[in-house]
Image (cartoon, helix red, strand yellow):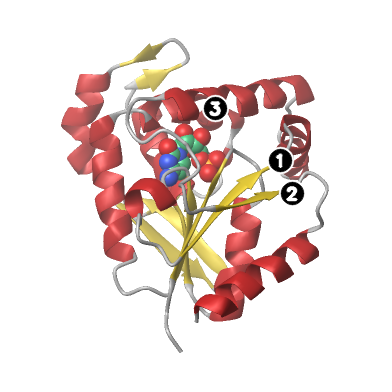
């Protein structure tokens, strides 16, 4: 059957990647976590002192962008692709609260977006792809066959993220996670270049109270109707 393009956008920690991974597995599609790419550029920027808690050396970062080589490598055991930055697996480092606190500043830079959007469009040019992020249905694939927009209450989202980090063994407190989730949403929604907005033709899912199974079933019928 036809290999379609599925775009999933929404606020942070709304379960986008969970749905995306399940879809990719079921339909045998490629899954691309674009947030991981912005996080990897942020890690690079942090390592080179282009960004920190109270500063952003935008011009320096832009001048060194060509040194950033991103790739995804499928991990058979995990069942999904992991993020590599210049040949190193950075999957763990990009998920820290510190990177989460800096990423929205880096993602607001147009030159960063231009580079990553071009790479994302290249990965999706054959179809058969599920991509999640903030601007997939609006900028990366405005002609996607199916666009989903995920939402959930800030409290539910922070709880989800908090559990993830605690399970990994990180020392974090709930309030700083809640603050980070809301602060990222604020920056992502108000930036000038590619702000997070629901595409006109996107279908909205609020999963504050919906189980993953019920939601996944509903999304699968949407996918099936496009095939
Ligand atoms: O999806 P995730 O929460 O990992 O994304 C991290 C950050 O990367 C977002 O808060 C946003 O600032 C940025 N991002 C973006 N555009 C995308 C994906 C992520 O600006 N398509």
Q: Is residue 39 visible?
A: no
Relative to 182, 172 lies left or right: right
Binning the other alpha carbons within 10 Å of mark 3 as few (below 14), some (14 to 19) or many (20 upward) gives some
- Would you identify the image quadrant in which residue 19 lies? bottom right
Binning the other alpha carbons within 10 Å of mark 2 as few (below 14), some (14 to 19) or many (20 upward) gives some
**Residue ID at (39%, 25%):** 191
The x, y position of residue 118, in whole percent, is 25, 52
Identify the residue position indicated by label 1 in the image: 152
Q: How far apart are the alpha carbons under marks 1 and 3?
A: 15 Å
Q: Earlier in the sequence, mark 2 or mark 1?
A: 1
Binning the other alpha carbons within 10 Å of mark 1 as few (below 14), some (14 to 19) or many (20 upward) gives many
Identify the residue position indicated by label 2 in the image: 207
| Residue sitting farthest toward the bottom | 1
Asked if disc 2 is less than 8 Å from ligand 1, the answer is no
Relative to 120, 89 lies left or right: right
SS for callout 2: loop
Label disc, if present, on residue 184 of the rendered structure: 3
- Residue 29 sits above or below residue 189 on the image: below
Q: How far apart are the alpha carbons under marks 2 and 1?
A: 5 Å
Asked if disc 3 is less than 8 Å from ligand 1, the answer is yes
The x, y position of residue 166, in whole percent, is 77, 38
Q: How far apart are the alpha carbons under marks 2 and 3?
A: 19 Å
Q: Earlier in the sequence, mark 1 or mark 3?
A: 1
Question: Do the residues under discs 2 and 3 have CB atoms within 8 angstroms?
Answer: no
The x, y position of residue 105, in whole percent, is 41, 24
SS for callout 3: helix
Relative to 70, 165 lies left or right: right
The x, y position of residue 199, in whole percent, is 46, 47
Question: Do the residues under discs 2 and 1 have CB atoms within 8 angstroms?
Answer: yes
Camera-near label (1 vs 3) is: 1
**Residue ID at (48%, 23%):** 187
């Amino acid at each position: 059957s036809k290999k379609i393009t599925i775009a999933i956008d929404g606020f942070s920690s709304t379960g986008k990647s969970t749905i995306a991974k399940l879809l990719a597995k079921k339909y045998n599609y490629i899954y691309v976590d674009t947030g991981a790419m912005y996080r990897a550029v942020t890690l690079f920027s942090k390592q080179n002192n282009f960004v920190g808690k109270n500063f952003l050396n935008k011009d320096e970062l832009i001048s060194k962008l060509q040194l950033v080589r991103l790739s995804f490598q499928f991990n058979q055991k995990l069942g999904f692709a992991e993020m590599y930055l210049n040949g190193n697996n950075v999957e763990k480092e990009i998920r820290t609260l510190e990177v989460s606190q800096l990423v929205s500043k880096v993602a607001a830079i147009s030159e960063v977006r231009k580079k990553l959007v071009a790479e994302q469009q290249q990965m999706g040019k054959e179809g058969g792809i599920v991509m999640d992020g903030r601007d997939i249905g609006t900028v990366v694939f405005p002609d996607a066959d199916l666009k989903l927009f995920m939402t959930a209450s800030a409290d539910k989202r922070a709880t989800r993220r908090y559990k993830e980090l605690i399970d990994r063994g990180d020392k974090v407190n709930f309030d700083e996670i809640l603050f980070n989730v809301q602060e990222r949403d604020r920056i992502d929604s108000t930036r000038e270049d590619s702000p997070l907005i629901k595409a006109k033709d996107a279908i909205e899912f609020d999963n504050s109270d919906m189980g993953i199974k019920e939601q996944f079933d509903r999304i699968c019928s949407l996918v099936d109707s496009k095939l």
